[in-house]
Image (spheres, rainbow, N blue to C red):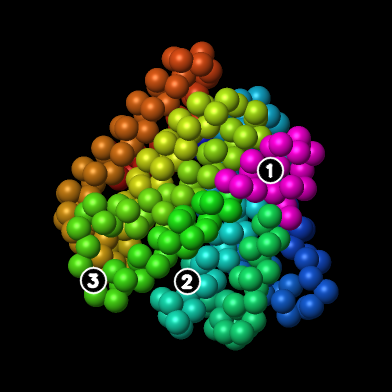
Amino acid sequence: MEFTEFTTKYYPVLEQFLQDELENVSTEKQLQEAMQYSVMAGGKRLRPLLTLVVAQTFGVDPQTVFKTASAIELIHTYSLIHDDLPAMDDDEMRRGKPTTHKVFGEDLAILAGDALQPLAFEWVVADDIQPTQKVALVQALAKAAGANGMVAGQVADMHATAGETLTVAELKNVHLRKTGALLAYAMVAGGILAGVSSQAQTILHEFGVTFGLAFQIKDDLVDLAQDDGEDKQSYPYLLGVNGARAELKEQVELARHLLADFANETQTDMTLLASSLNYFDDMVD
């Protein structure tokens, strides 16, 4: 099985799972509606799918760890709700729909984000896994989402948006935390669920970081093609379109080499996980 086939199989199942789990998530009706609206407003579900891919690569049935894998989508959604607020990016639309604060008001949008964050940790420990795995997952997610991870990246991104000119190295540092931290966690979480060694978790983290940078570069290129990224500091803005494509190709090749070396060392079939890099094919051909 390759990544496209895997996502075709599990994406609709994951969507239904999220819909069902969020149906009665709060006794406060408006809060429940705002949380559900935000999570179900569309998206590729790339992060939970990557966790499930890694878990399956190392022999875990994805169906048994849906809640743990989906927790990362709650963190991701909370960050988007807050990112869209007037005090942050002040966006009125996301994925073709009005943003949460435009539908429910700023106060309820903030609280919906606030509620999704602890719910994520509730979900992390809900599946039938070992207590040591639960502790490791909680610790890793808190680190990825916190003051030296995603939130730190958002702060650095705010400075850049405010007009501070960044170097390419500084831009990478922003995205290593804002985007890369959660994508790296997605990979590591799959490894923790499968009980892989600490060395294997380190390699999965490195792969996730590299994947995250490639993801951000592709996102910047897509934004530019849609006339939505001409003025923001991005890889195409700093490197030009050809330079950004070259950087994307370099990150994808680095990720391929990491997995190839990992597969040789562990004698593990990495075909499914390696095929996740096909996500970038349209930009690196």
Mark 2 near mark 3, Cβ–Cβ under 8 Å? no
Amino acid at circle 1: Val
Q: Which residue is mark 3?
A: 164
For image coordinates 59% across by 33% down, the residue present is 191
Q: Main secondary structure of the magenta part?
A: helix
Give the image quarter of residue 219. bottom left
User: Helix, strand or loop at disc 2?
Assistant: helix
Between disc 1 and disc 2, the foreground one is 1
Kindly report the distance in space between the C-alpha atoms of the residues bearing marks 3 and 1: 39 Å
Q: Quadrant of residue 167?
A: bottom left
Question: Label 2: which residue?
Answer: 83
Q: Magenta segment range?
A: 122-140
> Measured from the top left, where is residue 79 in percent x and y?
53, 65
Which residue is located at x 52 percent, y 27 percent? 200
Image quarter of the C terminus: top left
Sequence-wise, which precedes: disc 1 or disc 2?
2
